[in-house]
Image (cartoon, rainbow, N blue to C red):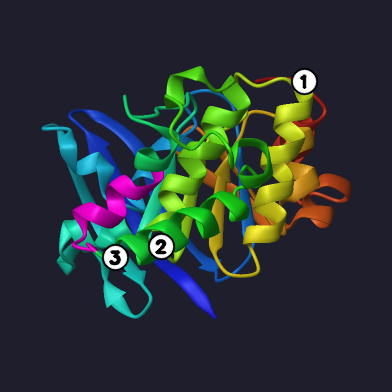
Amino acid sequence: MVAFSIRDLNIWFGGIHALQNLTMDIPSKEILSVIGPSNSGKTTFLRMLNRLNELDANFRMSGAIDFAGSDLRKMEVELVRKKVGMVFALPLPLPLSVFDNVAYGVRIHGEKNKGKIKAIVERALRQAYLWDEIKDRLELSAFKLSGGQQQRLCIARTLAVEPDVILFDEPCSGLDPISTAKVEEAMLKLKADYTIVLVTNNVKQAARVGDKTAFFLSGRLIELDKTDTVFTVPRDKRTDDYIRGKFG
């Protein structure tokens, strides 16, 4: 099964050709790790998948993006962002309690039954590996949590609205190794039910969690293959050089 099918995609921001002639498929219920140096197009690629690039007035594109059998650009934006959730590099909890952070999107989408909301919040916190740590502090301000806990809270908030895809944009860039390991553990469990796309500058993280890895350079997809293949016998010397730290 394929979650996204991308054909001949080009993206510009004004005169900058940010993504060039991109053609690839993203399989369902796998983790795709996306690596590459700065300004390689990784974040543009990620934001394309839930149409965040369209918020830039200078954005234009050509090509086709199919999401679960539908033309992504013809879908209602609200539906796209419900189905394709995103977790950003820095945790962005709302100025609310832990419980209300997770319940926020559920309520926005119309759920009013308190029992159902409570069950959804617990499920999402369990999926994000946070429930056991904060189950007795659900009324605590989200800002009182540690950075790693706040990031997992943001994951839970994304999960609560039942997306099909979760996009991670450098989710561990500001976290310590223990918090990073917990986020990675959550990702590995979540792929049983969700398609995950992870943009990371940490090639070791990409190797640890990715089923497949894509290497971007200067707006082009250089290589896409099974992670073990990319990290042991890459087809392109530029991929090998990047993984070995010779540039980037």
* Region in magenta: 102-112
**What's the distance in space between the residues labelled 1 and 3, CA to CA?**
34 Å
Please indicate, yes or no, whether residue 202 appears anywhere in the rendered image. yes
Q: Tell which tag, 2 or 3, sits nearer the viewer.
A: 2
Residue type, numbered disc 1: Lys
Locate the N terminus by quadrant: bottom right
Of callouts 2 and 1, the N-terminal one: 2
| Label 2 Cα crowd, 10 Å radius (few <14 / some 14-19 / many 20+) | some
**What's the distance in space between the residues labelled 2 and 3, CA to CA?**
22 Å
| Residue located 70% across and 20% down the image | 247
- Residue under numbered circle 1: 246
Q: How many labels sit on residues?
A: 3
Of callouts 2 and 3, the N-terminal one: 3
Label placed on residue 64: 3
Q: Is residue 107 magenta?
A: yes
Residue type, numbered disc 3: Ala
**What's the distance in space between the residues labelled 2 and 1, CA to CA?**
38 Å
Residue type, numbered disc 2: Pro
Q: In the visual, does 4 lie left or right of 190?
A: left
Q: Are marks 2 and 3 in contact (CB under 8 Å)?
A: no
| Residue located 16% across and 68% down the image | 74
Residue 17 percent across, percent down from the top left = 31, 35
- Residue under numbered circle 2: 163
